[in-house]
Structures are given as C-alpha cells and as structure tokens.
Image (cartoon, helix red, strand yellow):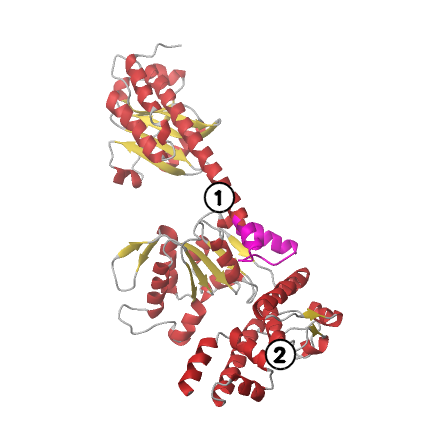
C-alpha cells in the first residue's frame, strides 16, 4: 500500500466533510473539485454522471467555470464521448491535439509524456456499475509520476461513487415514503368518504394502482376515456392524495372556453393582448401555481395554447400573449380527453410534442359497459349519498336491477348518477321497480343505449332546472304552488331546489316580491 502524503491526507480530510451535504449532489460534486483545485495542482476538472439507463449525461459539474456555465453543461468532453468512455469502465487519457480518449493500459502508460497529457480520467462506479467519470488535467506537478495521479484520482472517483450511492439510496427511500404516504392518504380519503374510486372490477383496480403511482410524483398525466367515466373526479383525487394537496386544484374546460369564443374563429378575439383563449388559459395556469392544473377536453386546445402548455411542461415557464415577460411557475398538469388522442395527433389537432410530454403517464378509464360488476357498488354508493344528503331511502327491486344490468350506460357513471337523482326527485316510494326506469332509460331499458348519453344527461338536467325556475317565477317564488303546478309534492320540490343550488335565489326573490 502506497504511503499517503500529508497533502493527500489533507484533501481526504476535507472531502470527508462533504459527505453531510451529499443530498445536494451537484453542489457536493462542485465542492469536491474545489478542494482538488485548492490543494493540488489541478486547474481544470469535471465530474459527469450518467442516468440510470446509462444512455445519457444527467449531471456535469466543472472546476474553473461559473455555476451558470455548469448549468449549460460546459464539460471537457461531448456527452456522447462521456457515455462511451464511462461504459468501458477503464482509466483513460486525452492527449494534446487529440480529442478522443484513449484507454490507459500498460503499453500506453509506458509511452506517456506528462507534458503532452491534456486530461486524465477514471470511471465512477455505483454498486459495480459505471455511473460516470471524473476527469482532471492533473493532480500533482512533476516529478510525481502520472501513476500517482491516477492512483489518487481513483480514490477520488471511489469517494464520488459513495456520494452517488448515498444520494440514490436516500432518493429511493424518499420515493418509497411518498408512495406509502399516497396509499395512506387514499385509504383515509376512502374511509372519510372525501373521495375514492367506487369499483370492484380488475380493470378499475389497475386504474387505482396507476393513480397511486402517478400521485407520488410530479410528472404530467394524461387520463383518457369516454365522456362520463369520471376522469375529472380521478384527476381531483390524484391531486388530493399528492404532495400538492394543500395548494390549488384548478380546472379549465377547453371545450367550454372554445365554444364560448366561437369555434369558427378557433378562439380568436380582438382583445388587447391577443388570443382570448390564451389569455384565459394563462390566467388558469397562474392560479394553479404550486398545485395542479386539470386541462379538460385537451383536444379542443388551439395550436397557440398547445404551444403555451408545452412550454409550461418543458420548463415550467409561462409567457402571456403579447408580453415578453416570462414567469416561472410550479404546476403539475393533468390532461383529460374524451376522444381518440392518437388519432387527433395523426390528424394534426394535437401537437405530437405535447402528446409526447403527456403520454409517459397515461391512464385509461374503461367505460361502464365493460365493467358491469362495478354497477352494484356504484348504485349502493349513490343511494347512500341521496340518503345522507336528502333523506331519501331508495332501493331497487329484482326486476329493476335486471334492467339496470342489461342497459349499456352510454353516459357511463354520470348517467347512473343522473338516473338515481331523478328517481329521488320523481318518486315518492322507496322501492324502485322496472316501470320507473323505462322512461329514464329510453323506454327500452334492456341492452341498449342512447347516443351522446353524457351530453343527454347534462341537457336533461339543464331542462329540469329551467322547468323548476319557470314554475317558481310564475307562482311568485312560492314553493308549494310551484310544486302543484309541476305535479310534485312539496318534499320533491324542496329536493329539486337543493339539488340545483337554488335556495339563496328563492329566498332573495321571495323577499323582493314581498
């Protein structure tokens, strides 16, 4: 074993103090190079680390460059050469006038002239796998041999490897704790009825697993599925069980904004500042800072707004239309789509770059007709909800359950919810038979569905609300008179007023009439 000089001992002693800062890895690596530059003859040095797949450089710090230069990756070797050289797992040299690294074996070492060596390097190993490179111009001046440089540089590389191992071990443990925390939050959410997936099928169990996985990270998510399957609820649940739950959850319905701006103009407006859609979208991004932005019906995003969203995803940067000021934002994006998003990309409606950023974490929610085993649990959940909120104790007869199981539910979960709510408001009895369902399920009620079920459910709800409001206006906002006009009991009328959130309006209008 070679004797360690006092100079080497001093360097190793100072490096030992860096271990406590290993969790700020890039800063710790920079300090390693600073120690070498302060106490030894090194003028230039770099430490480069590979990704876990060992296909690219993910971190590169250098001595005698500013921190700004380091962020740009100003290293002595191109990334491709770093990867190629690191994977050889052997010490190397770079001679003056020759940019290509040469593996340092016995024959090469015997021919080396120190004055002609531009760079010395050794691999960084993590658990026996190549993790990067340490490269310097020199460590010691002549007459110390290059062998002494390489020997001490190997010790430095081993120390860097320990920093990488420690950092990765802590990061893995943190990821594990995040996953456990997400699972616990989801369990608590279900127990408190704050929010959970009502399902028994294997396909929805897979959705739950995917949901917990993505909730533990900040990666963008794409949730796809037919209208009414509950994509927005799932997005809100991901937010609620994530680390961002204390910050805003902001929804932007691209279809609604697009329609309000006029689809023929594709969202264009003469508003100062440019595109009204882009202005609105930028406001929603800013409102979601620190939290989650839920982009509903993303296929309706105009190209300019897709570019804006892409910039947010790529660099967490937001630039308002007509303004050169770029604002840093901290936003997690969850995008929802009812359509065939791959086909939208092929047709040019969705940017391939935007889809590429979102498709890494994609969740497909299957339609209800493909998981009929979830229907009974969903019905029980909705019946319990009606019971808690409105005091209605509903139950389905065997004939009604058979009709419900045969129905295809084109409106998915939203249609089931609409049916249960209408049954609660339209019927006085507690037992629901097949006859009560026929009008709600299109009259046939067996093995058939209606086109645009979710849209139909929404329009039916709007129509019912308008009927209630019209009757109240005609009767001077007196509830029992409006109920008589509609052929309802006062209790049913009260249920509808609560269902549509009309209590404050009825009270204020009644006071004004008096």
For the stretch drawn in magenta, what is the main secondary structure? Answer: helix
Asked if 246 appears above or below 394 in the picture, the reply is above
Q: Residue at x 56, y 76 (%)?
A: 495
Q: Which residue is mark 2?
A: 426
Mark 1 / mark 2, whichever is N-terminal: 1
Can residue 267 be seen at all in this image of the molecule? yes
Question: In the rendered structure, which segment of residues is drawn in magenta?
Answer: 185-211
Q: Quick one: quadrant of the C terminus?
A: bottom left
Percent of width and height locating residue 163: 40, 29
Q: Quick one: quadrant of the N terminus?
A: top left
Secondary structure beneath label 1: helix
Q: Residue at x 66, y 70 (%)?
A: 394
- Marks 1 and 2 sit apart, C-alpha to C-alpha, by 46 Å
Can residue 371 be seen at all in this image of the molecule? no
Q: Residues within 10 Å of mark 1 (few under 14, many from 20)?
A: some
12, 302: nearer the viewer: 12
Percent of width and height locating residue 84: 42, 32
Secondary structure beneath label 2: helix
**Residue 80 position by quadrant:** top left
Query: Residue 178's mark?
Result: 1
Callout 1 touching callout 2 (CB < 8 Å): no
For the residues carrying marks 1 and 2, which lies nearer the camera in this image?
Answer: 2
107, 59: nearer the viewer: 59
């Amino acid at each position: 074993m070679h004797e360690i000089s006092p100079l080497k001992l001093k360097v190793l002693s100072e490096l030992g103090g860096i271990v406590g800062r290993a969790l700020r890895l890039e800063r710790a690596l920079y300090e390693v190079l600073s120690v070498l530059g302060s106490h030894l003859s090194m003028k230039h040095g770099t430490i480069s680390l590979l990704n876990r797949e060992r296909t690219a450089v993910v971190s590169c710090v250098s001595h005698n460059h500013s921190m700004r230069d380091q962020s740009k990756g100003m290293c002595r070797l191109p990334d491709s050469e770093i990867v190629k050289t690191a994977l050889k797992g052997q010490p190397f040299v770079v001679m003056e006038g020759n940019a290509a690294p040469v593996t340092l074996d016995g024959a090469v070492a015997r021919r080396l002239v120190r004055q002609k060596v531009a760079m010395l390097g050794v691999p960084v190993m993590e658990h026996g796998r190549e993790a990067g490179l340490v490269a310097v111009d020199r460590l010691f001046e002549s007459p110390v041999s290059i062998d002494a440089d390489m020997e001490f540089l190997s010790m430095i590389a081993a120390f860097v490897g320990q920093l990488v191992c420690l950092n990765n071990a802590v990061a893995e443990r943190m990821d594990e704790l995040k996953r456990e925390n997400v699972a616990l939050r989801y369990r608590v959410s279900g127990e408190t009825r704050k929010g959970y997936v009502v399902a028994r099928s294997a396909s929805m169990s897979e959705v739950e697993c995917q949901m917990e996985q993505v909730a533990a990270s900040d990666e963008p998510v794409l949730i796809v599925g037919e209208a009414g399957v509950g994509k927005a609820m799932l997005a809100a649940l991901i937010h609620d069980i994530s680390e961002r739950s204390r910050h805003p959850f902001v929804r932007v319905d691209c279809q609604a904004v697009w329609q309000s701006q006029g689809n023929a103009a594709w969202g264009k407006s003469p508003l100062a500042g440019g595109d009204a859609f882009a202005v609105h979208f930028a406001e929603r991004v800013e409102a979601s800072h620190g939290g989650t932005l839920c982009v509903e019906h993303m296929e309706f995003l105009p190209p300019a707004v897709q570019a804006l969203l892409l910039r947010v995803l790529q660099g967490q940067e937001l630039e308002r239309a007509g303004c050169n000021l770029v604002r840093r934002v901290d936003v997690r994006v969850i995008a929802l789509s009812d359509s065939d998003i791959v086909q939208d990309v092929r047709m040019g409606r969705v940017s391939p770059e935007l889809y590429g950023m979102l498709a890494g974490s994609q969740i497909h929610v299957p339609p209800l007709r493909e998981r009929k085993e979830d229907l009974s649990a969903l019905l029980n959940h909705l019946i319990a909800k009606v019971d808690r909120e409105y005091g209605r104790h509903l139950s389905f007869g065997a004939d009604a359950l058979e009709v419900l199981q045969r129905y295809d539910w084109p409106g998915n979960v939203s249609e089931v919810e609409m049916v249960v709510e209408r049954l609660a408001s339209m019927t006085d009895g507690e037992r629901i038979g097949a006859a009560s369902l026929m009008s709600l399920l299109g009259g046939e009620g067996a093995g058939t569905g209606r086109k645009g079920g979710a849209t139909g459910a929404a329009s039916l709800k709007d129509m019912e609300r308008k009927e209630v409001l019209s009757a109240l206006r005609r009767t001077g906002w007196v509830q029992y008179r409006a109920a008589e006009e509609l052929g309802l009991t006062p209790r049913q009328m009260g249920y509808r007023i609560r269902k549509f959130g009309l209590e404050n309006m009825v009270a204020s209008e009644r006071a004004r009439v008096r």
